[in-house]
Amino acid sequence: MKSAVPHTPMATLGAVAPSGPAEVAKGRVTQIVPSDAVGVLTIVVAGAPRCGKSSVTNALLGAPVLTAAGTLPPVGLVPPVDLVPAAGLAPATGSTPAGSPGSGVGQGSGVGPAPVRPVRAAAAVEAAGTTGGVVVGAPVTSAYVSFRHGEQPRAYAYVPGRRAPRVISMEQLRRGDPAMLVRGGPGRPPRRVEVLHPAELLRQVSLVDTPGVGGFDHIYTEIVLDALDHGAALLFVTEASTALHAAQLDFLAQVEQRDVPVTFVLTKIDSHPQWPAVLSANQKMVHDHAPRLATAPWFAVSTVRSCDGASPAAVEEAARGLAGLGMGALRRALTEPAPGEPAPRQPNGAADPAPNGAAVNGPAVNAPAPRVVDGVSDARWTQALDREIRACGTAAGQRLALDLAAIHARCVQDTNSQHGCARLAYVFDRELHALSLRATRSVDEAATAIMRKVFGEILEGPPDQAAVERIRRATRRAVEVAESGTPAWDRALLVTSTAGVAVTAGRGAVASLAAVEPGPIWDELLPPIGVGLSANCYSARHRDSDRSRCRGWLQQTVHTLEIDLGREMAQRFEYLREALAVVAADTVDHGVLLA
């Protein structure tokens, strides 16, 4: 079952010496950013651009960690101004980490977000003059920023192609400092930034602030929903200036299907006296479009000033639909369940212990093992296994080809815009991010369907969810045994500037492609599929302004990806076939499904 694809780490793509949280051994990252708070619920902060997501995150943390929405330019354009803290918040200098004495940041003082004042971004303007006027946007414009608890504030940028996370200062994170990305020309921005912060709230939950670009397009929606599928809760932020629009309601309808904890936040109530009417309209639309979310709590907040001075009439009008008013009420609700309510669900589907070996959120651990039907033959289940593997593998390959064709068409269309070639790397990388999630999910769903079909031929009855979980655990162990305990599960594919695909290895390499920190590797049935643009490729695409050349590179790259990703998916189905054959034979031999 050994992979036919070379496992050689790609040392040429942004290789750096190990530093900070990552330890590199034999070219592989063995550890990612640690936190002193483990097993806490992850909450994804989602909403439309400029609705106040980052301001809410800042207020929850009690410190101005992120730049407020609307202050950063679209990716691919030169920012005319940069932002620095107002007087009283001294910027970090040199190597002094933000939050240490003298930095004035991250001391956990409980103060709200500080005002900012615009100044010229000289470094960005100078870089623009040497690179044709194209500058990669600041990390907070396109990166997912995860906050976890740590005694000292630190930030690490996960850049695809780098085997270790890159340390950035808290000042760079808050300002969206373009200088860190444009040294020597446009650079590859991170997909994810991990922040350790001493905020007390982070002892109870971790937060993920989503990008302020893209809106609720199919890519943003896919990435956020994937995080929810892996056990995260949702903090949905919308502003009081206008009611929910169609894309937001469509997104919430998909969230409803996942049965995850949801909290609504209405922001900017200090600027919009009509907020009670907007609140009422929003609640009615949620009830109509996502009925199961109608009972989710709503909070009305201002991140600029206290809500104590809100109009008594307005508060009274909205009180019937509010679970709380102000950031304090929201902060308490996220960390302290209301009386009579269960504790928040644990991340990654982890279940709380319950009597008699049962699990609150999963199948019973001590359920009777399903028995094998009388007279079952090896030929019967072997034929079923081979048939389903072929059918599902073919279907997955066809979906991949259609997906890549659609991506190619959208990217070609985008190159027709004024900044199309400059934006191509950013647009294409986002598409590949969503494609990775779809391909991984496609293989996993196919694996579950194959298990049900094959073991439906073996067991006395169709396997229920508890039986499927048993089969998954046994299959995972079979893969480990066949691969001598070290399957190639930590490989990432990187598109090169020559339209090729290279392999980089290490858990940190895989983590650099994820929007949210990956779960434990032992929770995965099969290796996840991860693909993105390398740093060199990203830079080369930004420098190329020739539409014909850009489109030629894109077409060739899509063709290469269809071959390489098709091989990756076929490899996973081969993993699955051999592992399921072992589990099925073992089940028939013992007369019962063991796991």
Image: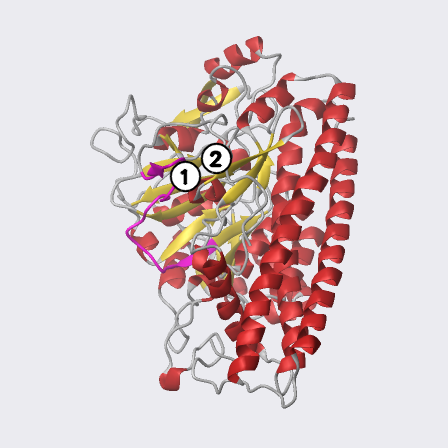
Q: Magenta part mainly helix, strand or loop?
A: loop
Let me know if residue 572 is in the magenta part. Answer: no
Query: Residue 240 placed where, x, y %?
Result: 57, 50
Residue 211 visible, this angle: no
Mark 2 belongs to which amino acid? Pro
Q: How crowded is mark 1: few (under 14 residues within 10 Å), some or many (20 or more)?
A: many
Which of the two discs, 1 and 2, labels the residue nearer the N terminus? Answer: 2
Most distant residue in the bottom direction: 374
Query: Residue 249 placed where, x, y %?
Result: 67, 57
Q: Is residue 568 left or right of residue 61?
A: right
At x 51%, y 10%, the residue is: 126
Mark 1 belongs to which amino acid? Arg
Question: Please, is residue 231 above or below residue 137 in the view?
Answer: below
Query: Where does the magenta region start and end?
Result: 21-43
The numbered mark at residue 28 is: 1
Look at the numbered disc 2 and give the secondary structure of its residue.
Answer: loop
| Residue at the spot of label 2 | 9
The numbered mark at residue 591 is: none
Q: Quadrant of residue 153?
A: top left
At x 29%, y 29%, the residue is: 88
At x 46%, y 59%, the residue is: 480
Q: Please name whichever residue, 134 or 582, is drawn nearer the observer in this view of the structure.
A: 582
Do the CB atoms of the residues marked 1 and 2 lie less than 8 Å apart?
A: yes
Residue 251 visible, this angle: yes
Label 1 and label 2: CA atoms lie apart by 7 Å
Q: Please name whichever residue, 211 or 359, is drawn nearer the observer in this view of the structure.
A: 359
Q: Please name whichever residue, 542 or 278, is drawn nearer the observer in this view of the structure.
A: 542
